[in-house]
Image: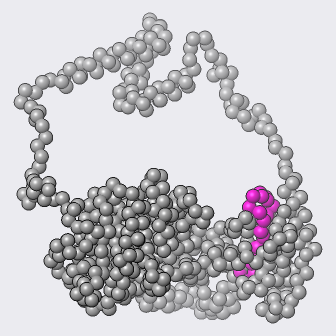
């Protein structure tokens, strides 16, 4: 049973609608489809789920129409695909002349009486799904039994079939390794010798195998005795001596910094001397500004190539061929078909995968572009390649600009008005740069005039607290309290190792509220997405403390792994959360962007799979190497040959 079927234009004008059941109108699910799929260029799959409904849609790019059918997702309706194709064809054929002659006015002033035709097509589709071809049994000639001979099916008592013996030998060779490989070879040699003697010695197969085993083990024992010849000169060392480094210190107490500071107070930590230019990088930068990501593209060189290429075939073909081709290009009435786009899309897919886009995402992107362009009339002086490339570029820019834009500074000021700290939680897999980029974001917030409390909730990795303590000392040296009216701009809250991370985060947030800190940055331990206990602990930390922003830190070096990490992190947060509406990842921090050149596909994969924005991009080793994502620059790098 269908809930609804609606036909509307891409401009938002509803042409015809069918309501199958009494209940809420189709407005909410159709609007969700438009926002989440059509506007976000995610048309790779023609199915969309909204609450309890499943929506299937079909695009008509020639007349700019959208056909949408909705039904309960618990139902399995096999005729829906056939129905939407039949309705699309019938509606186009019935009102083709009206669309072609009147255009947009035909949509505004036209009356579309399509109910009788739709009900007829619906009955035909339902009846076709009920009528199924009866299952035909295989004939004897088609079965495997007919291929066997009578001789191979006869088994003598006490003798095993040859196939089973061979299978057992193969299984034994896999289990026993190299020794078992040598046994069949010896057995085969023994079989040859027995076949040469003829009828003099008639032995059973078990006796042959036993004899070959005894011979093999006898030779193996002789070889082992030769290899075990004693070596009087070689003597084993009695014990392992510890290595002493030249610049090391044998006293472990000197290396213990666990009690050197209490809650990161700057007074208890000695201020270390270092070159501030090395920590800041660019001297000409504007303090507190988050610069956009830049990429130098060779657009001018590409435009020159495009201008020069059409001139070459015109010289070869001659005057008549060139004139005919020019007139044909001026008409510009060719509509794109799937066969025209398939070779170009295949090359585009391989290009995206080579640029580090996940293979699954590349296929869905090309499928979305194909659905968007199929049936569309090409413009004047345009080729299939240029049309597909332009559509793909637009889709990529749209994907990198998701629905929600995260403005951290605005949200921090809003939290200030409510007299509470703004809490950010960082999560991700091991070694992606969570602590380093947390320090960069701390520096950026301090330069914008906000005080920061860093919560050391990585109580598992050795050296995690010491790393944050070093960053705290350096940030306090760059922004001493004297420059901010005696106010300490960054402080570390830590309780050592082996403690409950969720409890430390809760205490840090309470401490920040009492001491008047503006922002709390919660550093968590790195964990693999398949580690269930650690993912449960992360879900507990987020559920208990309810941070304002949950950032997933991922590196730009990954390809298919980016999709797996984000999907499983979100799934783990949803499964292990106790809330009715679980808290998922809100944004992404993309690190190590300076190491990938133009292979920027991880940015596309991460935003496509989560629909979440990339809030920060890490591009180097200094505190100033933090950028905001520039969608056009990323797409330019991605489309570069």
Q: Residue at x 9, y 57 (%)?
A: 249
- Residue 431, quarter of the rendered image: bottom left
Residue 327 lies in the magenta-colored region: no
Q: Quadrant of the C terminus?
A: bottom left
Q: Position of residue 637 (x, y in %)?
A: 43, 79
Residue 74 lies in the magenta-colored region: yes
Relative depth, front residue between 245 and 17: 245
Q: Quadrant of the N terminus?
A: bottom right
- Residue 178, quarter of the rendered image: top left
Taking 17 as reference, is 360 left or right?
Answer: left
Residue span colored magenta? 61-80
- Residue 193, quarter of the rendered image: top left
Which residue occupies the extreme top position in the image?
Answer: 200
Residue 530 appears anywhere in the view: no
Q: Residue at x 40, y 71 (%)?
A: 510
Taking 135 as reference, is 399 left or right?
Answer: left
């Amino acid at each position: 049973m269908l809930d609804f079927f609606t036909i509307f234009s891409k401009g938002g004008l509803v042409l015809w609608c069918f309501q199958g059941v009494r209940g809420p109108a189709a407005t909410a699910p159709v609007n969700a489809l438009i926002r989440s799929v059509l506007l976000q260029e995610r048309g790779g799959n023609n199915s969309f789920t909204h609450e309890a409904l499943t929506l299937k849609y079909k695009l008509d790019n020639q007349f700019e129409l959208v056909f949408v059918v909705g039904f309960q997702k618990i139902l399995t309706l096999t005729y829906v695909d056939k129905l939407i194709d039949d309705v699309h064809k019938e509606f186009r054929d019935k009102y083709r002349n009206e669309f072609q002659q009147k255009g947009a006015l035909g949509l505004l002033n036209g009356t579309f009486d399509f109910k009788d035709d739709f009900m007829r097509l619906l009955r035909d589709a339902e009846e076709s799904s009920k009528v199924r071809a009866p299952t035909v049994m295989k004939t004897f000639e088609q079965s495997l039994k007919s291929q066997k001979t009578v001789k191979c099916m006869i088994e003598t008592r006490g003798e095993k079939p040859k196939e089973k013996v061979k299978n057992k030998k193969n299984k034994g060779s896999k289990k026993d390794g190299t020794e078992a490989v040598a046994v069949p070879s010896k057995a085969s040699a023994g079989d040859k010798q027995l076949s040469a003697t003829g009828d003099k010695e008639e032995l059973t197969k078990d006796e042959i195998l036993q004899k070959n085993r005894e011979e093999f083990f006898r030779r193996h024992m002789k070889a082992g005795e030769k290899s075990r010849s004693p070596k009087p000169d070689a003597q084993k060392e009695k014990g392992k001596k510890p290595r002493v480094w030249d610049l090391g210190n044998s006293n472990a107490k000197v290396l213990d910094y666990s009690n050197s500071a209490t809650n990161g107070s700057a007074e208890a930590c000695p201020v270390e001397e270092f070159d501030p230019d090395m920590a800041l990088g660019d001297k000409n930068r504007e303090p507190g500004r988050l610069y956009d990501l830049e990429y130098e593209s060779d657009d001018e060189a590409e435009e020159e190539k495009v201008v020069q290429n059409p001139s070459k075939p015109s010289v070869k073909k001659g005057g008549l061929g060139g004139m005919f081709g020019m007139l044909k290009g001026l008409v510009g009435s060719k509509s794109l078909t799937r066969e025209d786009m398939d070779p170009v899309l295949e090359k585009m897919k391989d290009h995206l995968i080579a640029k580090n886009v996940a293979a699954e995402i590349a296929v869905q992107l090309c499928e979305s572009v194909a659905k968007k362009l199929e049936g569309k009339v090409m413009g004047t002086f345009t080729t299939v390649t240029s049309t597909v490339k332009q559509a793909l570029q637009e889709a990529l820019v749209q994907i990198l600009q998701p629905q929600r834009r995260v403005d951290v500074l605005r949200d921090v000021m809003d939290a200030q008005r409510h007299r509470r700290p703004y809490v950010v939680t960082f999560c991700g897999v091991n070694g992606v740069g969570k602590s380093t980029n947390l320090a960069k974001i701390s520096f950026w917030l301090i330069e914008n005039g906000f005080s920061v409390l860093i919560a050391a909730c990585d109580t598992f990795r050795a050296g995690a607290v010491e790393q944050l303590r070093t960053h705290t000392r350096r940030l306090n040296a760059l922004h001493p309290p004297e420059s901010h009216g005696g106010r300490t701009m960054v402080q570390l809250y830590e309780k050592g190792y082996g403690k409950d991370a969720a409890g430390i985060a809760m205490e840090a947030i309470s401490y920040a509220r009492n001491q008047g800190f503006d922002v709390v940055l919660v550093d968590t331990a790195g964990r693999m997405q398949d580690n269930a206990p650690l993912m449960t602990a992360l879900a507990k930390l987020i559920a208990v403390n309810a941070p304002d922003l949950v950032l997933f830190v991922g590196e730009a070096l990954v390809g298919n792994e980016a999709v797996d990490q984000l999907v499983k992190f979100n799934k783990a947060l949803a499964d292990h959360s106790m809330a009715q509406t679980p808290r998922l990842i809100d944004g992404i921090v993309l690190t190590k962007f300076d190491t990938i050149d133009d292979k920027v596909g991880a940015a596309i994969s991460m935003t496509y799979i989560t629909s979440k924005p990339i809030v920060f991009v890490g591009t180097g080793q200094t505190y100033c190497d933090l950028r905001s994502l520039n969608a056009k620059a990323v797409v330019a790098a991605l489309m570069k040959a």
